C-alpha cells in the first residue's frame, strides 16, 4: 500500500467520524446544557451566540485519534514503513515521536476540557485560573520534552544551516529544554487564541495540515502524512458544524488539542522553527494580543487595535466572520508555501 492511499484513508475516516459525531454529540451537549457563555469583553454582536453548545472539539479529537490509529495500522499490516527513509533528516525513533505527539495533544485537550467543564458545568466563567491552566500545560509540555530527550529525538534540521544535535553538551541540552518549552507552550496557546470566531481556527489549521501532508512526501515519512491526514479530515469534518453560523464551538478542549497536534507535527519534521511560517496567523494573533496589552499599559489606556486578538480588530472594522476566515487562511497558506520551499531547498 502506498503512503498516499493510507493518507487518503486517514483523511476520509477522520472527516466521516467527526462530521458524523456531530449528529450525536451536539444534541448531547445541548441536553447537558453545555452552552457557551459569551463574555462582555468581546464584540457585542457575539451575544447572539449565547448558549451555542461548547466542547464540540470532542468530535474531532475522537475522529483524529481513531483515524490515525486505523490508518497507521492498515498501512503497517499492508507492509508499509511508517518511519522515514530520509536519514539525512529523520534519524530513527519516529514512532516514539508520533505517539508522544499524540499524547501531547491529548494532554493539552484534557487541560482544555477541565477548563471548559469548570466554566460551563460549574458556572465559573473564568474556568481554571491562569496559574492552574499554565501549570497543567507545563506538566504536559515537560512530559513531552522529557520523552523527546529520553528517546534521543533531539536533532533538528535548520534550513540552509544543517543538523543540530542538542545532546552534545550540557549547554546545548539546556537550550533544547528551554527553547522546546517556549515553542510548545507558545504554539499551543497561540492556536487557542485563534479560536475566537466561527470557523477561524479550523480553517487556518486546514492549511497547516495540508502543509505537513506535502512535507511527508518530501521527507518520505508516511507516519507524518497519516497523522497530518487525520488532522485535515478532523478539522474539515468539524467545519461542517463550526462554519458561520456555528452549530457548536470547539472550546478550549478542541483548540488546545489542535495546538498540541500542530506542535507534534512541527517536531516530526525535525524543525519546530518552521512553525513560525507554517502558523503565521497563530503568531500574528498572539503578537497582536501582546502588543495591545503592552501598549495599553505603557500609554495608560491607549490601543493599537480596535480589539485584540487581531481577528476581532477586523470584525470591528466591519469584516464578516466568513471573510476573516478566508483571508486569514490565505495568508497562512502563503506562510505554508514558504515553509515548504525551506524544506525543499534548505534541508
Image: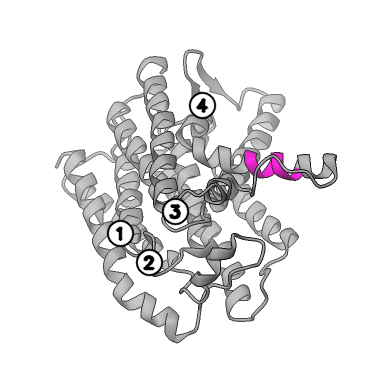
Element at label 2: helix
**Residue nearest the observer in this picture, 82 or 251:** 251
Q: Nearer the viewer, mark 2 or mark 1?
A: 1
Q: Which mark is residue 156?
A: 4
Q: As displayed, is residue 337 above or below residue 62?
A: above
The image shows residue 266 at horizontal and vertical percentages of 46, 37
Q: Nearer the viewer, mark 3 or mark 2?
A: 3
Q: As displayed, is residue 334 above or below residue 222?
A: above
The image shows residue 40 at horizontal and vertical percentages of 66, 66
Q: Which residue is mark 3?
A: 321
Q: Which residues are magenta?
A: 287-293
- Mark 2 or mark 1, earlier in chain: 2
Which residue lies at the image location 46% right of the left edge and 65% below the top edge? 249
- Mark 2 or mark 4, earlier in chain: 2
**Residue nearest the observer in this picture, 9 or 282:** 282
Q: Nearer the viewer, mark 2 or mark 4?
A: 2
The crowd level at tag 4 (other Cα within 10 Å; few <14, some 14-19, many 20+) is many
The crowd level at tag 1 (other Cα within 10 Å; few <14, some 14-19, many 20+) is many
**Residue nearest the observer in this picture, 25 or 295:** 295
Quadrant housing residue 20: bottom left
The CA span between labels 2 and 4 is 33 Å
Quadrant housing residue 29: bottom left
Q: Which mark is residue 59?
A: 2
**Residue nearest the observer in this picture, 51 or 109:** 51
Amino acid at each position: 500500500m502506498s503512503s498516499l492511499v493510507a493518507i487518503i484513508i486517514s483523511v476520509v475516516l477522520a472527516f466521516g467520524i467527526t462530521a458524523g459525531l456531530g449528529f450525536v454529540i451536539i444534541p448531547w451537549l445541548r441536553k447537558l446544557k453545555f452552552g457557551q457563555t459569551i463574555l462582555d469583553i468581546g464584540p457585542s454582536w457575539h451575544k447572539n451566540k449565547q448558549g451555542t453548545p461548547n466542547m464540540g472539539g470532542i468530535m474531532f479529537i475522537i475522529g483524529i485519534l481513531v483515524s490515525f490509529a486505523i490508518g497507521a495500522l492498515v498501512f503497517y499490516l499492508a507492509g508499509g514503513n511508517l518511519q522515514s527513509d530520509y536519514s539525512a533528516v529523520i534519524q530513527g525513533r519516529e514512532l516514539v515521536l508520533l505517539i508522544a505527539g499524540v499524547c501531547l495533544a491529548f494532554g493539552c485537550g484534557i487541560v482544555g476540557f477541565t477548563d471548559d467543564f469548570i466554566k460551563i458545568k460549574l458556572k465559573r466563567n473564568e474556568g481554571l485560573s491562569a496559574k492552574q491552566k499554565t501549570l497543567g500545560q507545563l506538566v504536559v509540555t515537560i512530559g513531552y520534552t522529557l520523552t523527546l530527550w529520553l528517546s534521543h529525538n533531539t536533532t533538528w534540521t535548520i534550513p540552509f544551516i544543517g543538523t543540530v544535535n542538542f545532546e552534545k553538551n550540557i549547554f546545548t541540552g539546556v537550550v533544547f529544554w528551554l527553547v522546546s518549552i517556549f515553542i510548545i507552550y507558545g504554539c499551543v496557546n497561540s492556536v487557542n487564541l485563534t479560536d475566537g470566531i466561527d470557523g477561524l481556527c479550523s480553517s487556518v489549521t486546514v492549511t497547516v495540515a495540508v502543509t505537513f501532508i506535502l512535507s511527508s512526501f518530501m521527507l518520505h515519512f508516511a507516519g507524518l502524512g497519516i497523522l497530518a491526514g487525520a488532522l485535515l479530515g478532523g478539522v474539515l469534518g468539524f467545519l461542517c458544524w463550526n462554519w458561520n453560523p456555528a452549530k457548536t464551538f470547539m472550546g478550549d478542549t478542541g483548540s488546545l488539542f489542535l495546538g498540541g497536534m500542530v506542535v507534534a507535527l512541527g517536531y516530526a519534521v525535525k524543525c519546530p522553527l518552521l512553525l513560525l511560517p507554517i502558523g503565521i496567523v497563530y503568531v500574528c494573533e498572539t503578537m497582536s494580543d501582546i502588543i495591545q496589552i503592552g501598549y495599553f499599559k505603557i500609554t495608560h489606556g491607549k490601543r493599537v487595535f480596535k480589539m485584540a486578538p487581531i481577528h476581532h480588530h477586523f470584525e470591528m472594522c466591519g469584516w464578516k466572520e466568513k471573510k476573516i476566515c478566508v483571508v486569514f487562511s490565505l495568508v497562512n497558506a502563503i506562510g505554508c508555501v514558504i515553509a515548504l520551499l525551506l524544506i525543499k531547498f534548505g534541508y
